[in-house]
Amino acid sequence: MKKTILVITLLFSIISFAQIRGTVKDTDGNPLPFVNIYIENTYIGTTTNELGKYEINTTEKNNVPLIFQYLGYKTQKQILNISQFPYEFDVTLQEENYELKDIVVTNSENPAYEIIRQAIASKKKNAAKTDKFEADFYSRGIFRAKDIPKKFMGVEIGDLDGNLDSTRSGIIYHSETVSKIKFEKPDNLKEEIIASKVAGDDNGFSYNTAIKTNYDFYENYVDFGINMISPIADNTFNYYKFKLESTFYDDKNQLINKILVTPKRDKEPVFEGYIYIVEDSWAIYGIDLDIKGYRMQQPILETMKINQNFSYNETTKIWAKNVQSLDFIAGIFGMKFTGKFTYVFSNYVFKDAFEKKTFGKEVVSFAENANKKETSFWTETRPVPLTEEEENNYIRKDSIQNARKSQVYLDSIDAKGNKFKLLKIITGYTYKNSYKNWNFNYQGLTNLSSLSFNTVQGYNLDSGFSFRKWNEETGKFTSVSSTFNYGFAEDRLRVKGNFYHRFNTINNAYINFSGGSAISQFNPNEPISNIVNSVATLFFKNNYMKLYNKEFAEINYGREVTNGIFASGKLLYENRRALFNNTDYTIIKNDDLYFSNDPLQPDNYTSVPFEKHHIMKASLGTRIRFGQKYISRPDGKINIQNDDYPILSFYYEKAFGASNSNYHYDLISGTVDYNKTIGNKGDFGLRFKAGKFFNADNISFVDYKHFNGNQTHINLLNNSLNSFNLLPYYTHSTNDAYLETHIEHNFKGYIMNKIPLLNKLQWNLIGGFHQLNIPNMKPYQEFTVGFDNIGWGKFRFLRVDYVRSYQNGFQGDGVMFGLKF
């Protein structure tokens, strides 16, 4: 009986491993990469790898019709009679003998324009044929790096976990997945990853999925982070010029039109290259298009090429995409990066409709042991054979991982960095135990990155200790830290501690304890950063930062309650004391006086904005993301925001237990956030924030609602939908009701790209509106117009806005400078 089972098992293995394999070359003997290969009138297909090698599985032996299709070459049909598997079959493809049809050119218009018009008129019909399907899906991704320096901005890069060789080059990422997908246009997806493999990572959970691989040129826009305009978009003639370069007949005697696609304006979000259209049906036969990085507003990216090959099934009369590839070249600071993603769709089953509840919020899941598949599984299932480089990379990376994850290796590496020297008392010290996933850090006595200046403390800097421990499999993370802050002019040391624990990466449940003594801005959002305040104070004597002292204890807990709903709670105790300026030091001398540390009376140096007191607060908050989808990974949950809906946030806070009962209050508030890309016309964003205090007539000024103003004309936070540009920091603080409105539209080049000369700048026009409503005051309003994406070459990090403010008439204007990092 056991022998029978063994024979049956072996027989099944042989049958399931039935392969046709070989190499595809041109007439000069050069291998042809990414040739579309499929069994005629089926959806069983594959493609050649970069060296022209292919493999395709079939159990049939007699009269197997194999189609070899490659853009620019004659489609070849081979009828195979197979004696045994695996079956070796090499093919030589000949370049297509192109010709132009005898078409009368009317008004000197190239016939391509009429073909494109027909394709546009027929695209809804053609797209509908493939709008619902099930399929097998394979993806492979590979990134290569070249000329990586040993150090970058003083930070040691190393060999990137063994990915770089002695020339500082190598494959830095290499993975593949096999999955089954169900898809319904426009964006319903259900994908189960059957197998996943990552070079040098025994967890093997690849990020390659079918999400964002539906580059559908039948749609008006193709999403590449920015909406690129399809060559057969409804408004395509506003953006492209077309030329019918040639025609040819495929193996089914269908006439294929090869059309050159050229942008009318260089800086638009457009493609260039070739689109192949089938005569009469006007379906897409193939895509061979390039994208320039600057057209995607990704200056680090130099070029990206997308290829799509479609096969025709005479039974279903459907042209279906079965091979897609993306190649890119990028570079910055002398470093070069190249990459390729290969996607193969096979075994299509086209549907008239899916059953209800086929699609839910979970769009990707992993089958059990998806990352534990044996080499034999991959050899049998992988539709695109590995190159020798890729095979060697898997072997090398797995070997390196085994060595570098061993306790002996990790301990030896840690031992070098764990050596203690007396100088580290000043500069800082870190002790690691990489094998057990924990480290200890001491910041040193000269943590210059924390050095800042304010008029209360003068120069001040931090030191401290921290301990971190983590578990990569469960997602648990624990951090214990302390911070010692010393102000030289104040001659005061403040110490605070923090404990943080994340329970998992599924619902991201966490708990946080903190307490001690600290200095804090009146606005807990800290609208002015330490570095901006230091420069404004030392060079211009504008000490806008207003501070108070607190001894505090706080506990926070939060988690995702259910998909799309995150809830948190906090309990806080604070003992508060007002502070005074302790220094008038400045680098640039002038006769101006510093403002006082009183935000209500900046010219009064003896009064305080509040009396010393203590208070307790309890708060509850929730954030709701409607329509949120997610990826379920064994090592965590990845949420995918649905931009079709706004994000709602609600918050309730109650103050109690104060030393003065007048300081008790209740606060209810909420926020609406909405961001939407509008075709190729840019990104629209809005934020509404509203709140209402109850029983708060005599509360401490610390607990007022303070608004994110700005008086420095510098914005380092890139928070244009969460702040005002010219509003003083505390003039509109309220203990009553309030409503904030922030609206902005970034045209992403839609207007600037059409203006000669100016389009060469590649700047983005931005318009905005901000309004603040509080009782007993006229609304405060700001109107802004500016430019984003300012810079040169690959470095575009500057934004400039002109702002006019109004309240009871014109208030003032100014220019804001923003930096994006």
Image (tube, rainbow, N blue to C red):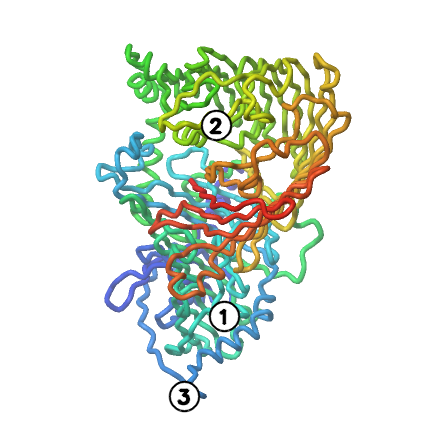
Q: Categorize mark 2 by other alpha carbons within 10 Å: few (<14), some (14-19), many (20+).
A: many
- Left or right: 406, with 137 as reference point: left
Residue 84 visible at all: no
- Mark identifier at residue 511: none
The first of marks 3 and 2 along the sequence is 3
> In terms of depth relative to the viewer, which is nearer, 700 or 377?
700
Q: Categorize mark 3 by other alpha carbons within 10 Å: few (<14), some (14-19), many (20+).
A: few
Closer to the eye: label 3 or 1 = 1
Q: Position of residue 10 (x, y in %)?
A: 46, 44
Q: Are marks 2 and 1 in contact (CB under 8 Å)?
A: no
Residue drawn at the location 27% of the way across and 33% of the way down:
151
Q: Read off the residue under disc 3.
A: 102
Q: Categorize mark 1 by other alpha carbons within 10 Å: few (<14), some (14-19), many (20+).
A: some
Residue drawn at the location 37% of the way across and 51% of the way down:
299
Question: What residue occupies the far right of the structure in this picture?
Answer: 695
Determine the CA span between mark 3 and mark 2: 78 Å
Determine the CA span between mark 2 and mark 1: 54 Å
Q: Read off the residue under disc 1.
A: 236
> In terms of depth relative to the viewer, which is nearer, 496 or 661?
661
- Left or right: 476, with 775 as reference point: left
The first of marks 2 and 1 along the sequence is 1
Q: Position of residue 367 (x, y in %)?
A: 55, 40
> In terms of depth relative to the viewer, which is nearer, 126 or 520?
520
Identify residue type, mark 1: Thr
Identify residue type, mark 2: Asn
Q: Read off the residue under disc 2.
A: 543
